[in-house]
Amino acid sequence: MVERRGARAAAVLLALLAWAALLLQLHLTLDATRALGGGTGEALLLLGGYFTILTNLFVAVCAGAQAWAPGSRLAGASLRGCATTAIVLVGLGYHLLLRDVWDPQGAQRVADNLLHYAVPAVALAHWLWYPPRGPLPAWSPLAWALYPAAYVAYALVRGEWLGQYPYPFIDVAALGYPRVSANVACLLLVHLATGVLLRWLASRR
């Protein structure tokens, strides 16, 4: 019972942290978009292109379900594992590939650190401290990799439509499809390896 209460409290903390990060970034993006003469639709369209934003939303929804609707499918071990693996990839990818691309200041730096470091760290700690109770199938990491694969397909179609890509390593206009394909393959392999590691750590716990 004590462990169950602790798991619920951790899920509440993770959900609130992810929602706070998302709402702060939404506020900042709305302000920046309106300053350029745009509206809410343009701000939401911009945010909807980023794996970081979508994955933080994924984590917020799954953690919220674990906290307030533990019997729902959204609170299941498989979706939780997928969300945790993806958000860990967000933190790794940003730190290794993107942190030197720009230098946010003020509130934007706070949002940036929440989305790319705080939420991934808390999600990972939550997974390690309160892992799923039942064993996860061996094929789980492969299933979890479908999420980033679907995102890449969406981002490429979106990029062709809008003429701009959310991340430089999938910018087909600048790099071409062969280079982008190689980049995507590497990222999917890292995601798969991360999923394998998280599944193993959960089984050890």
Image (cartoon, helix red, strand yellow):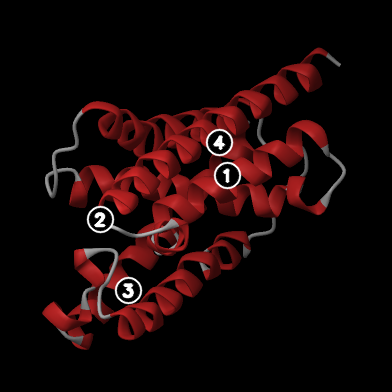
Tell me what residue is drawn at x 17 percent, y 80 percent.
179
Residue 80 position, x and y percent, is 65, 47
Q: Is residue 99 left or right of residue 38?
A: left
Q: Which sits earlier in the primary sequence, circle 2 or circle 4?
A: 4
Can the viewer see residue 199 in this picture? no
Please report whichever mark, 1 or 4, sits nearer to the chain's N-terminal start.
Answer: 4
* C-alpha separation, residue under disc 3 versus residue under disc 2: 36 Å
Q: How far apart are the alpha carbons under marks 3 and 1? A: 24 Å
Q: Earlier in the sequence, mark 3 or mark 1?
A: 1
What is the secondary structure assignment of the residue under circle 2? loop
Q: Which residue is mark 4?
A: 19
Q: CA distance from mark 3 to mark 4?
A: 30 Å
Name the foreground residue: 78 vs 35. Answer: 35
Q: Nearer the viewer, mark 1 or mark 2?
A: 2
For residue 185, the mark is 3
Q: Nearer the viewer, residue 166 or 1?
A: 166
Q: How would you rate the neighbour count of disc 4 (Cα within 10 Å): few for under 14, some for 14-19, many for 20 or more? A: many
In the picture of the structure, the residue carrying the numbered disc 1 is: 59
Amino acid type of disc 1? Val
**Residue count near mark 1 (Cα–Cα under 10 Å), binned few <14, some 14–19, many ≥20:** many
Q: Is residue 48 visible?
A: yes
Are circles 2 and 4 on residues that touch, CB within 8 Å? no
What residue lies at 58% left-to-right and 44% top-to-bottom? Answer: 59
Q: Of the residues tagged 2 and 4, which is closer to the observer?
A: 2
x, y percent for residue 82: 58, 54
Kindly identify which residue carries mark 2. 36
Residue at (43, 79) in percent of width and height: 153
Which dot, 3 or 4, sits closer to the camera? Answer: 4
Marks 1 and 4 sit apart, C-alpha to C-alpha, by 9 Å
Q: Mark 4 is on which residue type? A: Trp
